[in-house]
Image: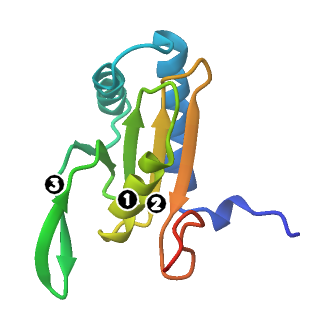
Amino acid sequence: MPRRLVEDFLYPDLTYKIRGLMYKIHKTLGSGHKENIYCNALEREFTLQKIQFDREKVLPVVYETVKVGIYRPDFLVEDKLILEIKAVSFLPQEFERQLSYYLRGTIYKLGLLVNFGNRSLIIKRMIWDKARQPNQLKSA
């Protein structure tokens, strides 16, 4: 099986920076806080690092050129990736599905699901495009 090169990843520099910030926040705050606390810390880090972001930006869901709803992810970073923050002891698949719905219902292809609720930080990376649909979503 061929090794994946960094060039094969979407936005490798940006995701590297974000991951670093997540680990910094987790190391400083630890686990056990509410989701909002981690989001506030991340917002501060994005501002300090001059990383452009929108918090809870309304993203339209379009069906045949008609807006049929909205999604509101925790963060949209540099208008490139969706970032969902959780602070739960157990990360159910429902949260992964939520991120996949955000990706397939919008123009964005990359999402990160981050859980601060455990002693160990959990970061899941998800790509959505026509060629690479998430494994956890299967057609009926």
Picture coordinates of residue 33, whole percent (x, y): 38, 14
Residue at image location 38% in from the left, 32% down from the top: 49
Place residue 99 in its image quadrant: bottom left
Residue at image location 66% in from the left, 64% down from the top: 7
Residue at image location 69% in from the left, 58% down from the top: 6
Indicate whether 12 appears above or below 104.
above
Q: What element carries label 3?
A: loop
The residue beneath circle 2 is 110
Indicate whether 58 appears above or below 30.
below
- Taking depth in this image into account, of 140 and 64 the one nearest to the observer is 140
* Nearer the camera: disc 1 or disc 3: 3
Between marks 1 and 2, how big is the CA–CA gap? 7 Å
User: Label 3 crowding class (10 Å Cα cut-off): few <14, some 14-19, many 20+?
Assistant: some
Q: Which mark is residue 58?
A: 3
Look at label 2 and name its amino acid. Leu
Find the residue positioned furthest to the bottom.
64
Look at label 3 and name its amino acid. Val
Q: Residue 80 carries which label?
A: 1
User: Label 1 crowding class (10 Å Cα cut-off): few <14, some 14-19, many 20+?
Assistant: some
Picture coordinates of residue 68, whole percent (x, y): 13, 73
Look at label 1 and name its amino acid. Lys
Q: What element carries label 1?
A: loop
